[in-house]
Image (spheres, rainbow, N blue to C red):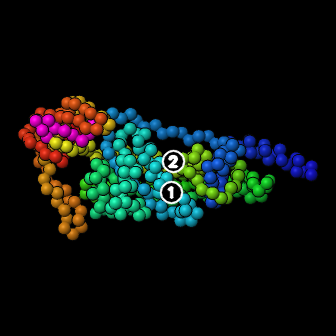
Amino acid sequence: MLKKVFLFPVILLLVLGFSSITSYGQFGETEEEFEETREAAPPPPPPAPVYPPYHGPKKRIAVTKFLNKVRGVYGNWNLGEGFAEMLTTELIKTGRFIVVERQALQDILTEQELGQAGIVRKETAAKVGRVLGAQIIVRGVVSEFEMKESGGGGGIGIGGITLGLSTSNAHVAVDIRLIDSTTGQVLDSHNAVGKAESTGVGVGITDGDVSFGASGFQKTPLGQATRQAIQDAVRFIISRMEKVPFTARVIKFSGGKVYINAGSRMNIKPGDRFYAYSRGEELIDPETGLSLGAEETLIGTVEVRDVKEKFSIGQLVSGRGPLKRGDVLRLR
């Protein structure tokens, strides 16, 4: 009896004395359970990423639901939706992109029967991009999502909870592809990776599921590795999108005025100048059905004079018109 009385305060001191991230059971945790564990051994919050200021035009992109290729316990989690939401949120934070609303994207994917497993086929990606007005479609695959633990053996059990020293190693990897919404071709790809490790008092919990938005999950090694992988993916997208010229389209050309499908929401400002190209017939590969592009003829330069929230009005200041609906404008 005296032994038990003596052991209990020792265990409490162990739990309170370690501020490192707790390790978890094999099957995941609920948000409620995460909160309980966090109180036992609160870890330091992960640093928020800082993105350089950006004042240029925002490019419009779409993020599809990730394909989950993880097997085992974590394969049952809704990783595809969770990763897509996290990536969307992080891309918006950069201030560089207009991200297509997830519901609008899902509606179109469902109509075109692309929603199954989050797959966007090359021959239909172009059609989806045109409907959404996106320049680039981001497709992701969750290839690795795991946490391994070592130590913790011989822990002291109280009321069904096992306490002991353990080391947790989390590893997350996602494959990102950037797809040209005009041609459906893959422009670039990247394997984004995140890793995290912690050593401390392990509190094992072995049932339930987890919410990606739960503060407890974000502070676990697995949550931190996920955040690192997403940030790696964002850095890749930013660097590659800098090479993709900003484009807009002519809504209509009337009375010398050029109506443009980009406004203040996309950081368009009075005085911005675009090269205007008359777009010819789209060339479709008869075997694959993919767009091979179209002939474009430089017409002149358009200068923005008036900016609304969703569109702007410009004037053809050089060259000869007329322009027509669908013609391409590229920022000078």
Q: Residue lying farthest bottom?
A: 287
State the SS at label 2. Answer: helix
Tell me where residue 276 appears, x and y as whole percent: 15, 42
> Between tags 2 and 1, which lies in front?
1
**Residue 105 or 248: which is nearer the viewer?**
105
| Residue sitting at x 56%, y 60% | 74
Task: Give the magenta range.
Answer: 253-263
Mark 2 vs 1, N-terminal side? 1
Tell me where residue 196 appears, x and y as whole percent: 57, 50
Q: Which residue in the protein does label 2 denote? A: 227
The quadrant in which residue 53 appears is: top left
Q: Amino acid at mark 1?
A: Leu
Q: Is residue 6 visible?
A: yes
Q: Which residue in the protein does label 1 denote? A: 79
| Residue sitting at x 36%, y 40% | 96
Q: Label 1 neighbourhood size at 10 Å, few (<14), some (14-19), many (20+)? A: many
Q: Is residue 196 visible?
A: no
Left-right relation of 171 to 178: right
